[in-house]
Amino acid sequence: YKKAMKIMREMVLMSGISPNILHCNALLASLSRARKDDVALDLLDCMLNGTVPVFISANATVPVDDIRMARPDLISINTVLAACSRCKNYRDAKIILQRMKNKEFLGDNKIP
């Protein structure tokens, strides 16, 4: 997961690339496998808010104001739920499920 975080940080800070959904989901999967549910939850919130995570913006020498994170999809949410499950973090998993029920993640998009 550390290498994946480093790559995303370099991608954003050195190339000015806004992470797309594939970048974010790959990082979420890496964090889930490493049992880093806290970082995965933070990344999910940043994806929802369109803000840059602290692990990217901390000590940045270039502005990150124009960088936008991809919006989460079903894979993003499922991956964060898996991270919570691996860490036995059922409280946050329940919160995510409630937020899904309230359509905070995907709005009125129909699930295929």
Image (tube, rainbow, N blue to C red):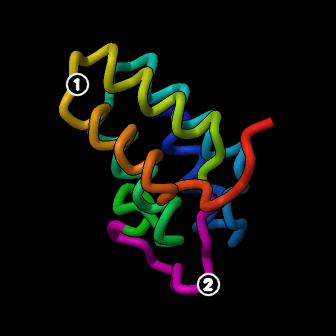
* Residue 87 location (% of width, % of height): 25, 18
Mark 1 vs mark 2, foreground winner is 1
Q: In this view, does 18 lie to the left or right of 52?
A: right
What is the secondary structure assignment of the residue under circle 1?
helix
User: Which residue is at a point 35% across and 44% down the rendered structure image?
Assistant: 98
Is residue 65 shown in magenta? yes
Amino acid type of disc 1?
Answer: Tyr
Query: What residue sits right under mark 2 in the picture?
Result: 66
User: Which residue is at a point 21% across and 25% down the rendered structure image?
Assistant: 89
* Residue 109 location (% of width, % of height): 71, 55
Is residue 109 shown in magenta? no
Mark 1, Cα crowd under 10 Å, few <14 / some 14-19 / many 20+, is few
Residue furthest out toward the right: 112
User: Which residue is at a point 61% across and 55% down the rendered structure image?
Assistant: 106
Between 57 and 100, the one lying in front of the other is 100
Query: What residue sits right under mark 1 in the picture?
Result: 90
Please state the extent of the stretch shown in magenta in the rendering. 58-71
* Residue 66 location (% of width, % of height): 61, 84
From this view, report whether residue 67 is shown above or below residue 105.
below
- Using the numbered discs, state the Cα–Cα distance from disc 1 to disc 2 in whole angstroms: 35 Å
